[in-house]
Each structure stands twice: as C-alpha cells, then as structure tokens.
Image (spheres, grey):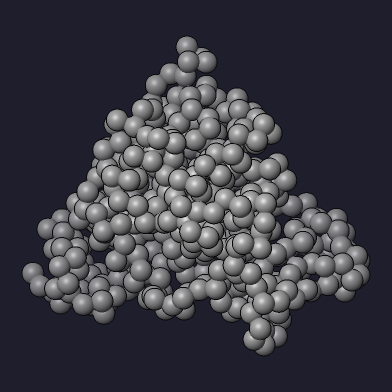
Amino acid sequence: MNIIEIIDKKRRGLTHSEKEIATLVQMMEAEKAHDYQIAAWLMAACINGLDMDETTWLTKAFVDSGKVLDLSDVGGVVVDKHSTGGVGDKTTLALIPLLATSGVKVAKLSGRGLGFTGGTIDKLESIPGFKVSLSAADFTRQIRQIGMAICSQTSDLAPADGKMYALRDVTATVESIPLIAASVISKKIAAGADVIVLDIKYGRGAFMATLEDAKSLAYTCREVGSRLNKSISTVISAMNQPLGCAIGHSLEVLETVKLLKGEGAADLEALCLKLGSVALVCAGVQPDLQTAETALKQRIEDGSALEKFRELVVAQGGDPYFLQDASLLPQPDRVLMIPAKEQAYVADIDAMEVAKSAKMVGAGRLTKNCPINLGVGVLLHKKIGDAVKPGETLVELYADDKDHRDAMEVLRNAFRFSPEPVTPPALIDEVILGEVLHKSPVSA
C-alpha cells in the first residue's frame, strides 16, 4: 500500500492494519512521504480518529523508529514525568531536581513549544549555555553521575515522533487524543524509565477542553502503556487560569527558581508536590502520598533541591550565575503594566487569552521553524480569588519595542472580576497510581 492509499483509507474513516501504520511511519522516516502528505494523514486521523489498536501500533512504530535507552545500570529506580501542556506549566523544571534529591533517578525527554504552550526545551535554552541536545551515551552517563538529565528528542530516540510532533503544531492536529497518547508514550518508552507519571491537563488553557476528555486521554495512555508493558500513573489537573504566575521562557525559569527557594506560587507548588509524590510512591521510595509530599517539602526547605538544580545547569553547560543575577537571562525591551480599575476580586483569568497575548509578543511559534523571543511573556500579579484595589497592578506584559496595543487589550480582557469574594478553583481532579515497583523500606 502506498502513502496515497493510506491517506485515503483514513480519510474514509476506515481502520488501518498494524502493517499500514508501520509503513506510514517508515515512509515518513525514509522521506518517501512528503510533509504535506503526512499532514493530510494527520488531519484525517484527527477528524476520524484512531482506535486503541491503531494508537498502540502508532506508538510502537514511533518507538521502533529509534533506540530504546537501557538505563538498568544507572543505579536506582528511574522516573520520568510528562505534561500534556498548559499555560505557565514549568513543573518539569522544578520536579527534576526535587526528585533527584529524593531517592530516585530522573530521565527526561522534553519537547519544544506546541500550539499555545511553552516547551520545556525552549525554556531551558533561555539559560545561557544550557545544552539541550545530548547523545544517548551522554544522557545515560549524566543520570549515572548526578541522578538526572533532560534533553530534547534526538535522532536516535523515537525520531519518527519528533517529525510528526513538529507537523502537528502547524496543522491544527494537536488536540487528537490518539496522537497525543502515541507521542507521549513513545517518548516515555524510548527514554527507558521504570516509573512514568503523566500530568493530564484540561480546561481553556489545555488541549483537552473538558474533564471527560482528560479522563479519556488518561485512560488511553494507561491502556497503551499496559499493552506495551509499561505501567503508567496519571494525574488530572485543571488549566483554566495559568499555572503559577509566569508565562514565557525566561520568566518561567525564574519562577522555578523561586519555587525551589520556597517562594513559589501556591498552585504551582501544590501540583509539583502531587506529581512528585506519585512518582516516589510508585518507585517504592515512600509508602504513601502524604509522607512523600512531606519529604519533598523538606527538600525545598533545606535548599537541597535548589542546589540540585544548579548542579543540573552546570552539568549541561549552563551558566549558574543567573541564579544570583537574573539579567543574564534574555530580557524584554520593555515592561507594560495593566492596573486594576476598581476594588474587586479576581473571578476568572482566561488561560487561553493569556497565552494568546504572550504569543502575540513573540513567545510562541506561528510556523514549524519560527524563532521565538525568550525574553518576552506575561507576569501575573493577581490570581483567581485575590482582592485588587484601583491602580494596583494586575499583570505585566514583557515585550519587545513594537506596538503591542492589541496584545495588551487581549490580556486586559482575560480578567473577570466580582464584587464578592471568590473561592479559587480546585486544581487536581483525579490521581490514578500505576503499579508500585517494590515495597518501600519505610513500610516494610
């Protein structure tokens, strides 16, 4: 079957065989199928769907397109965490050092910005000198030496997913549950981790609009993982308002540092602690979620998590002095402030509109190879439930020297207010733990 026949079959809503899925991926890898042909298939798959068999076969084809890391000799349980993406989601940056100081190893493959979300790799590139590309050998060696490593997808780890991932970003096919699941699980399997934790987000600022969609994606990921002999834990979290206060690459790195100093936004810290707790329990390092969370908090309070983050930066060629001097990170040309007009309470902050404003000033990609501005973004001074007074700063727009009145208007309209006190929305909706690797020494 040739590529046109494969596209046509999915266009007509028919089901692929495992061989057809494998052929599609192999032709893309061998450049026997053009980008526009893969894009056509992606749109057909997005509209007509992939069943669980097709999703599993696509995941397997992605894995088979490259190597699978053997991390059996790094000395300990290896953990990997992935988020389906959201506005202001910098949990990976904080979790890597937190977990690496808590009795597990961390092997993390991350991506660049996709759709309206910021990419972890893009954020790390705002740190001067930080090397985001590591060979498989260097990746493994670093985990063995300092207990953690993070890098972008390389040509030898699920490379077919990397190619399809980039095309999804610019073809309006990001939201497909089967495509998301195949992309996520293939990277996790390729990275060789023992424990996999997925943060599935839903809401206006996420690819999954509803809790029902998020639960469907969580189930799909767990089922595909099970069929490919990987136990997966899922946490479902809300993404209606941005996570934390910073949206933008340098800004999010700085907010990560604040969290590791014990000065982080409450919602960001809560999610990091929950995800980290799930990882530690499934790794058998802690007996239950509450005990694990207490241990993680201690790593922040005693400064060990921040010191571990510094160690990660140094290990991957970054300049750690930005921890003392934030001006070493990419900077905006100017900062524009939006003040409150009246005394009230913040009732809502539309995460998607906030992301849109950040993208308008250059923090996101419009095309596959589009450059981004690492110094621009949005900094929230108020979150849902906060009281505001007339003239008090609600939010800042970090921008270049162009005219950004349109972005300012979008950002201003992202806020809604109430004369009465407002209760902040719940952050975490569901936690399902995968298989625990072995009994914790604490509970034995």
Whole-percent x, y for residue 406 in the image: 67, 85
Whole-percent x, y for residue 65 in the image: 20, 55
Q: Quadrant of the N terminus?
A: bottom left
Residue 54, relative to residue 356: is it above or below? Answer: above
Residue 418 x/y as whole percent: 83, 64
Residue nearer the viewer, 293 or 220: 293
Q: Residue furthest top?
A: 444
Q: Which image quadrant is residue 274 in?
A: top right
Q: Residue at x 34, y 45 (%)?
A: 139
Is residue 295 found left or right of 133 in the rendered image? right
Q: Is residue 222 left or right of residue 300?
A: left
Which residue is pictured at 29% across the width and 47% down the height? 136
Q: Quadrant of residue 77?
A: top left
Would you say residue 15 is visible in this rendering?
Answer: yes
Instruction: Name which residue lies at 75% across and 58% down.
Output: 384
Residue at (34, 39) in percent of width and height:
141
